[in-house]
Amino acid sequence: MAELPKRYDPNSVEPKWYRRWIDNGDFVVNSESSKAPFSIVMPPPNITGVLTLGHVLNNTIQDILCRSARMQDFEVLWLPGTDHAGIGTQTAVEKHLRRTENKTRYDLGREEFLRRVLEWQDKHGGIIIEQLKRLGCSCDWSRQRYTLDEDYARAVQRVFVDLYNKGLIYRGRRMINWDPSAQTALSDEEVVSKPQKGNLYFVRYEIVEEPGRFLEVATTRPETIMADTAMAFHPNDERYVNLLGKHAWRPLAREKIPIVADDAIDPEFGTGVLKVTPAHDALDFEIGQRHNLPIVDVLHADGRINCPAEPELDGLDRFEAREKAAELLRARGALAKTEPYENNVGFSDRSDVPIEPRISEQWFLRYPKTKDALAVVRDHLIRFFPVHWEKVYAQWLENIRDWCISRQVWWGHRIPAWYRKQKSEVRGQESEIYVGVEPPPDPENWVQDPDTLDTWFSSWLWAYQTMDEETRRKFYPTSVLVTAPDIIFFWVARMIIAGLEFKPGKSDRNENNIPFRHVYFTGLIRDKLGRKMSKSLGNSPDPLELIEKYGADGLRFGLMRIAPSGQDIRFDEKQIEEGRNFATKLWNVGRLRQMHGPSSPEPKIDNRQVSIYAIEVLSRLNETIDAIDAAYRDYQFNAVAQRLYDFVWSDYCDWFVETAKTEIFSEDEAKKKCTLATMDFVLSATLRLLHPFMPHITEELWFLLGFGKGSIQFAAPPQKIALDDVTDVPGKRELVSAIYQTVQAGRNLRAESKQPSNKKIGFILRTEEKLISGQLPTLTRLLNAEEVRLDRKYQAPAGNPVAVTPLGEIFLAIAAADSARERERLDKEMAKIENELRTAENKLKNKSFVDRAPVAVVDEHRKRLKDLSAQLARLKQAREGLN
């Protein structure tokens, strides 16, 4: 058995073990195994992405679940993969082209551009996979998938054709969300509303038939006035009813436009008059359809103004044009006033620029199975953690709109639709459409749709299309999905719909076709000031740098301790440093144990020799196992981490290990052997409990301490130890608690009296507790005392520092302290006890509490009241002794 080095070095230990796990095939799944299945499909990161703290959080949780399941003897499939990220990857390549060659994709042509994207993918793709391995992710890498794999792409095409043949996919000219940066359509879910400060421009439109009379309209977008094709008011608005059928002069690109009445106008909002711009607003488009208004589009695809009738605006960027339009309106006497204004503006989730509503011909999907998708979550065939996301999910499904699935990008799954060539190949004049997985039989007479499918249209098949039939029979539906709530509509809901529609399960029943049984939604990681992480703010640390500095285990454990279920996470690097310090603490505990001889893989604890301190730490271990099991059931990972931290650092290291030294260094071999067996039992259990969170250091200690022949990742979880044959466990635990409280009180006395913690001084314990005499060696060690003298009749001199403990009063055996300072200390202690007494008394005076609370709880409060009263009496006695 190798000796543990003095210092733990994660940068040598972690890669060593990960390489060994891979070489041993420890993560490779067996689809023919008779073990019960546990499966997770990894939310696929972008092929050209790099590791972020969000990835660390999400994948650490998945790894915890998978490693925990392996230890429980499940056959575990954690299936990894990457997403082609159509818009994101194409945008990155286009930026590179502009920067290095001053070219666009159109300069290269489709074939050459896609070749360049493939080159980019080969160079940058897969980096994040290697980074996930450095984090310790226990995926079956032999099953790694990609959304552009040949068979996966074929499945996407089949799904498109199937839904088209069912009448669920159609092509139409509708108002869509347009991203002027990526120059593509977006779905409603890809638009993020953000508050923006700007101006409200009050514009005057003169009545054609009544010169000198004006209608005043407020707008935030004067740059689109040239696209106005009508003015509208509510038909019951008596202020304007006499204007119906008349016209107004449009002030930019001057032209007369009709005045119409429409029920959609709110007469209470603003002036009660709306300028109707059908090409650039969804509501205006609907009004325009009802009144047969022309559609005038004054924006190019890239967001520049397209209006030769206003030369000073034509060709300007839309935001430049906003300022210029205001100047022109002012010069023409059409701008009444301008006011500061804040409103919500839709931004592209992809390129983070304001979107433009735009009329465009696109492919749309009418969602199938929406009622079933609601039911499977409502009836808890699928459970959400935290549960409040069920309501958000239901609201979206109940108000669902058709999904715009076509994208004007070249990188991705090309739409399997062809149009019959005609003399004019203008798309709007094409009449015949062919949709199929294979090209039409006479391809020379057809032209394929140039668009690709929304990336989410491929990833909604991810939960099952990543598996072959044999794997699916074993592992589908998957056990749990770990994801962020911001893609609950993009991905989670759509995967549920896809599973219910395409039925990849072993039967047609919904419970066999849902993609997962549980969904755990992580929180959003923010900086310690509560701001979102971003490169521009410089508050987004590089996880690889954190791993280099603190180790992967330190990063994992530190992050999980501050990740409360369903809440945003305030990141502070000090927490990761604490994760590293915890690993160091664990290492030092292992070294301490190894100094006293070899450990036993199956320690035998002799209950006849077991100390009261061993009983306490074993009982605390039992409680920790129960608490951890309960926390896992509710996906409370931070509760698991904190419980383990407290148990290792406090219960085991601070208390038990220090008490154990008394018996380890004693002459009683039986007690020494029993104490070392207790240490082995607790250490072995602790390493197994910690393994899912800190896989590398636990494997290293498991191996070096000789706790098992095989890898810790396949070791059974620890079981609680039975202490039934130990007499009076509650009484012994109560005595240990009293000793620990007495030690803490003695240490506080020392600190308050400014006695150095490393200086041996004397203590006197005035007590009636007869059992304490046998514990004096341990009490002396814990207090770092020269001596602890028992004297039940001790009379302290005035000013002698004293503290009241469950065992009695403890005094410092030093010259009398300053009486005034001691009185002040005792007064503070008495005030604290009196406050706790009032709380306990009020609780017991509450008849509702006494009648409804369990008898044991009420009895505990009564005992606490009695103990506090006794402590207060002793403090008062000590205080009086100072007068």
Image (cartoon, rainbow, N blue to C red):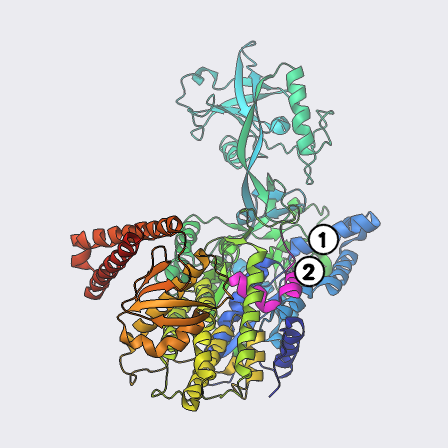
Mark 2 near mark 1, Cβ–Cβ under 8 Å? yes
Residue 28 visible from this viewpoint:
no
In the image, 98 versus 373, the foreground residue is 98
Whole-percent x and y of residue 190?
56, 48
Q: Does dot 2 land on a helix, a strand or a loop? A: loop
Residue assigned mark 1: 92
- The part of the chain drawn in magenta is 540-560
The amino acid marked with disc number 1 is Ala
Q: Quadrant of the N terminus?
A: bottom right
**Residue 869 x/y as whole percent:** 23, 57
86 is higher (above) or lower (below) than 203: below
Q: In this view, does 73 lie to the left or right of 16?
A: left
Q: Quadrant of residue 525?
A: bottom right
**How crowded is the residue under tag 1: few (<14 C-alpha within 10 Å), some, or many (20+)?**
few
In this view, 268 is above or below 407: above
Separation (CA) of disc 2 from disc 1: 9 Å
Residue type at mark 2: give it: Thr
Circle 1: element type: helix
Relative side of 775 to 168, left or right: left
Q: Which percent across, then down, holds residue 738?
A: 33, 68
